[in-house]
Image (tube, rainbow, N blue to C red):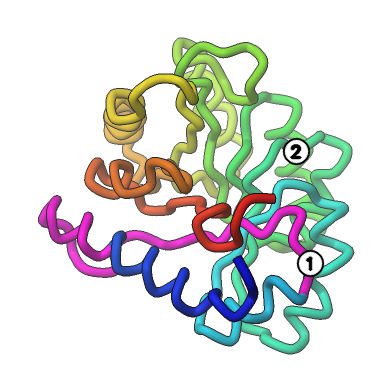
């Protein structure tokens, strides 16, 4: 893929999202497309910005710090989401840079984020990541521990807007997305960050409010 293809790739993904929304009888535009730009540099990102994409996702705080300040100076209305794991000692940097954090998964991180938000008077939206498939190697709070973590996050006045998951890669994603949607509904959370390049249409039909798409937009890394 070349950067010249970026507008067409973006149009294709948006069209597929719109079709999935229509299929599920959801309102048009109910799903926010996060273009996951991890490992891609400005020359690969700017064509998508030029084509109208404004919401981007990064996996690492340091990588985002290196490339996004200049890009955002040129295009101030960009919204930046942290979609990768976050170390507690990077919480302050994350709060300073990102508009949303999708990987809140433990009490120490809740505490660090709450402290950083109070100090900086800046409150990025937070998604609690759920280890939906009980895979210890992945980030996320275990399903049985979710109520307690949400209670701690709310007690710390964290702006929790939804849940996030990464289903087991070798299994059909739909049941996991349906489970996350039920958990979010049970806890009164409107946001569902789920679905990536291989399964975002399924996620949209099951209620995703945010899909995290990298390869379909940027090509294989």
Q: Which of 14/181 is in front?
A: 14
Q: Label 2, on which residue? A: 86
Give the CA separation, mark 1 to mark 2. Answer: 21 Å
Which residue is depicted at the point 33% across and 24% down?
172
Identify the secondary structure beneath mark 1: loop
Which residue is depicted at the point 27% across and 46% down?
207
Residue 152 position, x and y percent, is 58, 27
Is residue 53 placed above or below 126 in the rendered structure?
A: below
Q: Is residue 124 visible?
A: no
Q: Is residue 118 left or right of residue 192?
A: right
Q: Residues within 10 Å of mark 1 (few under 14, many from 20)?
A: some
Q: Which range of residues does the magenta coloring cover?
A: 18-42
Residue 1 position, x and y percent, is 60, 65
Which residue is depicted at the point 70% across and 60% down?
98
Q: Is residue 120 visible?
A: yes
Q: Label 1, on which residue? A: 41
Which residue is depicted at the point 75% across and 26% down?
108
Q: Which mark sits nearer the N-terminus, 1 or 2?
A: 1
Q: How many marks?
A: 2
- Observer-side mark, 1 or 2, equals 1
Q: Which of 78/36 is in front?
A: 36
Residue 169 position, x and y percent, is 49, 25
Is residue 35 placed above or below 202 in the rendered structure?
A: below
């Amino acid at each position: 893929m070349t950067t010249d293809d970026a507008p067409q790739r973006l149009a294709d993904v948006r069209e597929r999202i719109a079709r999935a929304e229509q299929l599920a009888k959801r309102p048009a535009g109910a799903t926010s497309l996060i273009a996951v730009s991890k490992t891609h540099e400005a020359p690969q990102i700017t064509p998508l910005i030029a084509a109208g994409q404004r919401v981007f996702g990064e996996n690492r705080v340091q990588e985002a710090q290196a490339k996004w300040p200049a890009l955002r100076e040129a295009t101030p209305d960009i919204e930046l989401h942290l979609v990768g794991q976050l170390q507690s000692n990077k919480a302050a940097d994350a709060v300073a840079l990102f508009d949303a954090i999708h990987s809140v998964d433990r009490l120490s991180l809740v505490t660090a984020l709450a402290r950083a938000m109070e100090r900086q008077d800046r409150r990025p939206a937070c998604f609690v990541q759920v280890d939906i498939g009980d895979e210890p190697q992945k980030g996320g709070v275990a399903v049985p521990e979710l109520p307690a973590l949400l209670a701690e996050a709310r007690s710390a006045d964290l702006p929790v807007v939804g849940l996030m998951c990464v289903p087991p890669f070798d299994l059909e994603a739909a049941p996991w997305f349906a489970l996350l949607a039920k958990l979010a509904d049970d806890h009164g959370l409107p946001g569902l960050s789920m679905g990536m390049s291989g399964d975002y249409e399924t996620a949209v039909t099951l209620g995703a409010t945010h899909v995290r798409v990298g390869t379909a937009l940027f090509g294989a890394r």
